[in-house]
Image (spheres, rainbow, N blue to C red):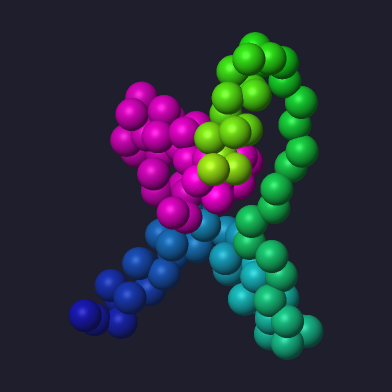
Amino acid sequence: MSSDNVAKTAIKIIKRNPEYFEALVEFEKTGKLPKFTYKQRINFTIDETLLREFRIYCEKNNIKMSNKIEELIRKELFRKNPRIKKTFIL
């Protein structure tokens, strides 16, 4: 791969994922890598029975409810728009 191709590829990666480049700059300055992903607390209303059953299911299968919900959201988003996969780390 020529140096021109490497440079073009690097620019594409930086444009697509600027947070990674910023993290590397932060590491260069401080010697520590910042978090790449952040969680945000949300509130929404769902059926009480559904929630109870889901909680039981997660407990029996040793699954974190939030992780399972994230997985289901990703699947739904990817099904609707396959290009969105590039924006998530799986």
Q: Is residue 13 above or below residue 60?
A: below
What residue appears at the point 32 percent right and 35 percent down from the top-left corner?
82
Query: In x, y percent, where is residue 7?
Result: 38, 73
The residue lying toward the viewer, choosing from 15 and 57, is 57
Left/right of residue 33 with respect to residue 15 in the rendered view: right
Image location of residue 71, percent across then percent down: 48, 40
**Based on the displayed image, in which of its 4 quarters is residue 4 positioned?**
bottom left
Asked where in the image residue 81 lies, by quadrant, the reply is top left
- Magenta region: 61-90
Q: Residue at x 24, y 81 (%)?
A: 2
Q: Nearer the viewer, residue 63 or 85?
A: 63
Numbered marks: total: 0
| Residue located 40% across and 34% down the image | 75
Please state if 30 lies on the left or on the right of 25 as rendered.
right
Can residue 8 be found in the magenta stretch? no
Location of the C terminus (image quadrant): bottom left
Q: Nearer the viewer, residue 5 or 71?
A: 71
Residue 88: percent from left, percent from top? 47, 49
**Above or below for 9 versus 72:** below
- Image quadrant occupied by the N terminus: bottom left
The reply to whether the magenta stretch includes residue 84 is yes
Instruction: Report whether residue 69 is seen.
Output: no
Which residue is pictured at 64% across the width and 56% down the height?
37
Most prominent secondary structure in the magenta stretch? helix
Residue 2 visible? The answer is yes
In this rendering, the answer to whether 20 lies above or below 73 is below
Residue lying at the far left in this picture: please name it. Answer: 1
> Residue 33's image quarter?
bottom right
